[in-house]
Image: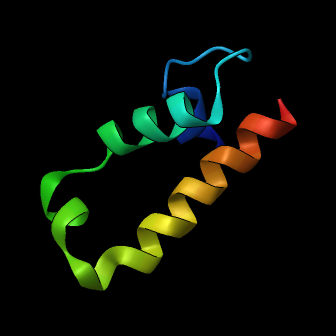
């Protein structure tokens, strides 16, 4: 997950909202629209936010 975070192309000073927007752009359309994948999306966003707060 850390490698994915590095590919978000964000800075340390960016807000959490910018991190979520950048992470959302990394997901493909079917993953964004599928209600079954909702928990996986939440885990992905939380992991990106966790890496962002640690950096």
Along the viewing direction, whichever of 6 and 36 lies nearer the viewer = 36
Residue plotted at (73% across, 17% down): 12
Along the viewing direction, whichever of 10 and 3 lies nearer the viewer = 10
* Vertical order, 3 against 27 (above or below): above
Q: Is residue 54 left or right of residue 41?
A: right
Q: Is residue 39 left or right of residue 38?
A: right
Provide residue 53's location: percent of width, then percent of height: 81, 38
Residue plotted at (23% across, 64% down): 31
Residue 24: quadrant of the picture: top left
* Vertical order, 29 against 23 (above or below): below
Residue 22: quadrant of the picture: top left
Provide residue 32's location: percent of width, then percent of height: 24, 60
The colouring scheme, among rainbow, by chain, secondary structure or one colour, is rainbow
Q: From where the camera sits, is residue 1 visible?
A: no
* Extreme residue in the bottom direction: 36
Residue plotted at (49% across, 28% down): 8
Quadrant in the picture for the C terminus: top right
Provide residue 29's location: percent of width, then percent of height: 14, 54
* Extreme residue in the right direction: 54
Residue plotted at (54% across, 54% down): 45
């Amino acid at each position: 997950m850390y490698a994915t975070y590095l590919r978000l192309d964000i800075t340390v000073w960016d807000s959490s909202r910018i991190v979520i927007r950048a992470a959302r752009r990394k997901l493909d359309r079917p993953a964004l629209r599928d209600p079954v994948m909702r928990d996986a999306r939440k885990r992905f966003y939380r992991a990106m936010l966790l890496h962002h707060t640690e950096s």
